[in-house]
Image (cartoon, coloured by chain):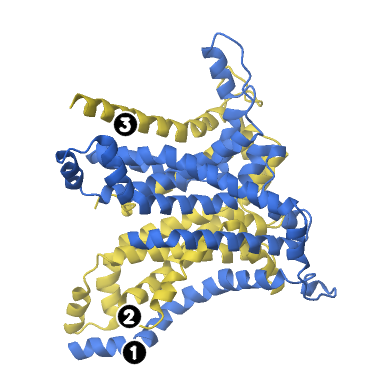
Chain colours: A yellow, B blue
Amino acid sequence: MATTRILEWLGRVYVWLLLAFLYLPIIIMALMSFNVSPFYQLPFEWTTEWYASLWQNDQLISATWNSIKIAVITTVICTVLGSAASLALYRYEFRGKKFLQALLFPPIAIPWLITGTAMLIFFFGVGIGRGLFAILLGHVALALPYVIVVVSARLQTFAPELEEAARSLGATQWQVTSRVTLPWIMPGVIAGGLFAFAVSFDQFVVSYFLSTPGQTTLPVEIYAAIRKGFTPEINAVSTIIIVVSMALMLLTARFFKFGGEK
Amino acid sequence: MAGQVAVGSRSGLRSALPLLLPAYLWLTVAIFLPLSAMVFFSFMTDLPLSGKAWSFTLDNYMTFFSQGLYPTLLLASLRLGLEVTLWCVVIGYPAAYVLAKVLKGRSREAIFLLVILPFWSNGLVRIFSWAMVLREGGILDTALNAALPFEINIDLMYSYPAVIIGLVHSYVPYMVLTCYLTLQAIDDSLIEAGRSLGASRLQMLKRVIVPLAMPGLVAGAALIFVPVVGSFMEPRILGGRTGTFYGTIIEDQFVAVFNWPLGAALSFILLAVVLVMLALASPVLKRAA
């Protein structure tokens, strides 16, 4: 019994060490964004000047707006198309359904480097070219499978008898969907939408290959800045990004448990 | 009622199509056609729309095999993938075990969320954050020198270990997630039964827990190995000049050298390797499902 308790105690310590490994660099980066020295020298002296100078950086601001716009449009398109597809996959039986479901995995499983360069070649070849529209096309395709998977998971908890009952009481197909099915899957749809936003807002690789100097997103701009040299401004904007995306995921977790306890 | 269901399934595809078409059309235009175009393009001498003459060729693939550089870099990337995956197993599996079998209730939920939260935050930014820690005169350096009585110089930045650390940091939550899900599904009474039959801790781990958790381990390994082999941003930022891998060479073909046909061929070879890896992992994964 005593050994069990010691082992359990060691286990807890170990998990906290892992959390330290995961969070320390991020916390240090955040702290450095409030440090006076532009070369990250200690001792630490508090300042907000790097955040203030962000507002003067037109390039970063326009890239941020692009990122937000693309993420919002991606979210809207993905929730609508993804929910519709999930409903169809849930409600109807037809040949090739397994195949359609399997098709959702290549976009998730294939490295973004391959998908991104393939998109670059194809969009260039058919005349779409590079730029914000191409980035949007790519982001929606990358986020759609996630939305379909999340909404489908929610649909698994739905009792089909409810639809039958509504139908037998004389509801039309549209009424069944909008009054019975949709309200039930709403948490899944919202979680899927938040996933889509996160996938788009954090996406770097695909955006990188599809952007042009004027039409770019925030992560691409940050990558360019990092390769030129580290500045506290990058820390500041990175800190903002990480806070935004973590807050988003906490929100998502409220709507959708990640396969944890039921 | 039974008739209605039968009608429903017979005309299933026709009713499903309007709902399915927009999503799958989008995936076709933005994923499946581009991947096919890439394969097609990898057999060409030049971009067909640049006005220049082009023809079909095997040269791009010949380049891969004839120049030792490319296979060497592919091997280096595969080794990187293997090393990162192994570290993720070593670090992530015990954590998943503690989460699934030791912690209970609210603290388990909270810590689980904390572990997978960074995974959904910006990967580029997290890699960048390591630069603060690893550089000479950075936090690790300063902290160790303050704590130790003698002078040491930690300058891990722009080195192979830096790339490994950054990638493990990026991907270890995947391993914790997949292992946690399979470990959690193991019935506690199985463990108790083994114990009461006199199995030692080590025997339990070897005979019961690891075999039952195998699908999660393999799923996690596949989810980590595949993107790491194709990584280019992480080696660029943390590896500096030592950070040349297969992914960075592909990036170069598209953004620096502008040899797109060669880039397409290199990408396709990577895709083939990735698909073989996923195929190898799939029997174990199917057993889980």
| Residue depicted at x 39% and y 75% | A98
Which chain does the residue under circle 1 lie in? B
Label 1: element kind:
loop
| Residue depicted at x 55% and y 58% | A69
Query: x, y percentage for residue A170?
Result: 19, 85
In the image, is A211 to the left or to the right of B50? left
Q: Name the residue under label 3.
A: A11
Reading the chain from its start, which is encountered first: label 2 or label 3?
3
Q: Mark 2 points at which residue?
A: A92
- Between the residue at mark 3 and the residue at mark 1, the CA separation in whole angstroms equals 55 Å
Given the current orientation, which residue lies at the most extreme left position? B196
Given the current orientation, which residue lies at the most extreme top position? B149
Q: Badge 1, how many Cα within 10 Å: few under 14, some, many 20+?
A: few
Query: x, y percentage for residue A44?
Result: 56, 19
- Kindly check if marks 2 and 3 are in contact, taking CB atoms under 8 A apart as contact: no
The disc labelled 1 sits on which kind of residue?
Ser
Q: Which of B193 and B115 is in front in this view?
A: B193
- Kindly check if marks 3 and 1 are in contact, taking CB atoms under 8 A apart as contact: no
Which chain does the residue under circle 3 lie in? A
Q: Mark 1 points at which residue?
A: B11
Report whether residue B110 is seen.
no
The disc labelled 3 sits on which kind of residue?
Gly
